[in-house]
Each structure stands twice: as structure tokens, then as C-alpha cells.
Image: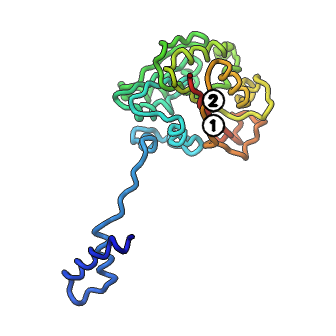
Amino acid sequence: MHVKLFLPVALLALAGCSESSTPAAIVEAAVESNPAPVAATSIYEDAVASSGRTDSDRERDAGRKPAQVLDFFAIEPGMTVLDMFSGGGYYTEMLSNIVGTHGKVVAHSNQAYAQFVGDESNVRYADGRLANVEILMAENNELELPADTFDVVMMVLAYHDIYYVSAEDGWPKIDGPKLLAEFLSGLKSGGTLAVVDHYAAAGSPRETGGTLHRIDPSIVIAEIEAAGFVLDGKSDIVRNMEDDHSLSMYDEQIHGKTDRFVMKFRKP
């Protein structure tokens, strides 16, 4: 197929060349005049490559593989997405880029997360640089979402915090069933609840979410299905089989490199 494609070009080049031109030179000239097309990038790769992202964001990409994760969750232009417990906005910025001017991202946070991330979110949202992002401050158990509004609710590295309790950090116990019911109400029919979190050892109790900041995915599946969602897919995109599940996710041996599960659930 390639020979047939380039042969007429080579013959034309031969007719216009001097007798001293070699066949190899003629073929090389033909190839140079017809360079291979550049492979198109996906909207997810474009979002990751955006020049507006910080060096700090990029340093986290290797462990998080955001382009693949967002592709798996099928985020699309024009969508309305809730980034739950968005922290400093690592995913919010990429979501903003993907959903575009006809879409919207609601970046949720609370006082505990705001204090934890410091100036990161202030810098990210300064001067309205992400025009399609709305900030939603709501403390634990106070979230109220408009019904049938969101195409996707993302909860990244935060589901385990349902089982975290700390008066010192201003983090009261979350009413898990109430939170999931709010997600179900806020999502459109067919909408997606997207979850990424740190693996706990199989059979670990729920309280592991508060001690090691990890959770057994079987708990997540059981609770979300009990809330009325349907499991719609799982991915091993960010697995790390060398992770010791007995370590806190904050342990310096594994921080930023934990073994993680990726799952999506559909609102019927």
C-alpha cells in the first residue's frame, strides 16, 4: 500500500531531477514533501497539557493519570460536573477545560479542606481565571444540591472521609446515606457518580477510612448500590500492587503513590 502511494510522487520527482540524482535521494525528497500526519490528542490529554496548570499539578500527574481517569468517567464538553471535596482544585481545573464555555463545574469545599490546602485554591481561582467554575462551600451534612442538575458527581480520594471524625480539624461525622441520597437527587437520570480512592486491605472495617484514610472497595460498592445507584464500571488505571495497604496513605513511603480503585456508578 505504501509503495503504491509514493511511487507516482517518486516518478514525478525523477522527471524533474538531474541525471545525477540517485533513487534514494528521490524517495527521500518525496517522503519529506509528504510528512506523516501528527496524531490527534484527546480532549483529556489537552486538558492535562494546558499551559495554565501549575508545576505542582503536573508533579501529581504520574501517580494520578488524570487523562485516563477523566476518559473513563466520560467527561464531555457542555456537561455540568460537581467536584466534591475538590480541595485545591487539581481536578477542577481540568474539568473546567474539558466542559468548556457551554459547561459548568461546581467545586465543593468546606472550612476544613480550605485550611488544609492553604492558598492553592485562592491562587487557582484568582481574578476569575476559570470562568465556568462556581465555588460551593458546604460543611459536612449541610450539602443541598438542586435536583436533576449534574451529569457527573466526582468524589476523588475523599469517600473514605465519610468515616473520618476530628473535632480538632473541624470534621464532624458525615451522614453517609444522607450524602449519597443528595448525590442521587442532584444527578440527572443516567448521570454518573465517579469515585477514586485508596485501597484498604480486603475485609478492613469502615473505620479504616478514619485511621489509615483508606477504604475497602467492597464497602463503597455496597453502600452506593444501597443508595440506589448501579455499578457501571471499574478500572485498574491507578493500581499500584507494591503498596502496603497497612500503611496510612500519608506515610512517606507511599504518599502520592497509593494503590487506588476507580469506579463509576449510574443513576437509573
Q: Looking at numbered disc 2 in the image, what kind of residue is underneath it?
A: Leu
Q: Quadrant of the C terminus?
A: top right
Q: Looking at numbered disc 1 in the image, what kind of residue is underneath it?
A: Lys
Which residue is painted at 25% across and 79% down in the image?
Answer: 11
State whether residue 180 appears in this view.
yes
State whether residue 117 appears in this view.
no
Provide the secondary structure element on which disc 1 rests: strand
Which residue is painted at 48% across and 41% down in the image?
Answer: 55
| Disc number lying in front (2 or 1) | 2
Q: Quadrant of residue 39?
A: bottom left
Residue that badge 1 annotates: 234
Q: Which mark is residue 231?
A: 2
Which residue is painted at 38% across and 25% down in the image?
Answer: 132
Give percent across and percent down for residue 96. 42, 31
Provide the secondary structure element on which disc 2 rests: strand
- Asked if labels 1 and 2 touch by Cβ distance under 8 angstroms, the answer is yes
Give percent across and percent down for residue 1. 39, 70
